[in-house]
Amino acid sequence: MSVISFLLLVVSLAANWRVYQKMGRQGWEGIIPFYNIYVQFEVLYGQGAKMFLLLIPFYGIYIAIKAAIDLAHAFNQSTGFGWGLVLLNTVFVCILGFGKAEYMDGSHAVTSDDAISRTLDSIANEKK
C-alpha cells in the first residue's frame, strides 16, 4: 500500500467518524464495515434492516444512490451533493465531516410514497 493510499484511508476514516458524530452517533460506528451502513439506514429511515435491500440486483444500485442523496439532504445539502457522494465519496464525505455542514434530521427522508417503504410493504403483503 503506497503512502498516498494509506493517507487517503486515514482521512476517509476520520471523515466518516466526524459525519457519524454529527449525526449524533458514536464516531466509531462510522468506521466499522457493514455496521456503518446499518447505522446510516437506521438514522435516515428508522430501520437499519433496510440495508439488506442493497443486496437486490439492480434495485440495490437505486437504494445506494437514494441513501447517498438522502444523507446529503439530512445535512441540508442539494441533490447534486448527493450525486457527489455517489461518484466521489471520499471527497464529499470529507466535506460533510470536516466542513460546516450540520445534521438536521433524517426523518424527512421517510415519506408515505417512499420507494423503500413501498417495497417492504409489498414484500410483507406477499408473505401473508
Image: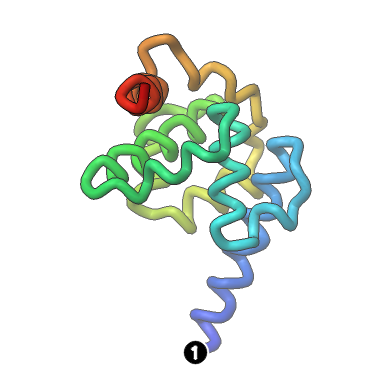
Residue at image x 78%, y 48%? 26
Say how many tags the image has: 1
Q: Residues within 10 Å of mark 1 (few under 14, many from 20)?
A: few
Residue at image x 57%, y 53%? 94
Where residue 38 appears, as percent x and y from the top left, is 57, 46
Q: What type is the residue that disc 1 sits on?
A: Ser
Residue at image x 42%, y 27%? 78
Examine the rendered structure and indicate whether residue 4 appears above or below residue 20. below
**Label 1 element class:** loop
User: Residue placed farthest to the front in the image?
Assistant: 128
63 sits left or right of 1 in the view: left
96 sits left or right of 55 in the view: right
Residue 75 visible to the viewer: no
Where residue 85 appears, as percent x and y from the top left, is 42, 46
101 sits left or right of 87 in the view: right
Residue to which mark 1 is pinned: 2
Q: How is the image coloured?
A: rainbow
Would you identify the image quadrant in which residue 101 lies? Answer: top right
Examine the rendered structure and indicate whether residue 20 appears above or below residue 106. below
User: Residue placed farthest to the top in the image?
Assistant: 112
Foreground pick, 118 / 101? 118
Examine the rendered structure and indicate whether residue 74 appears above or below residue 15. above
Q: Quadrant of the C terminus?
A: top left
Where residue 65 appears, as percent x and y from the top left, is 34, 40
Residue at image x 37%, y 34%? 66
Where residue 1 appears, as percent x and y from the top left, is 50, 90
Residue 79 visible to the viewer: yes
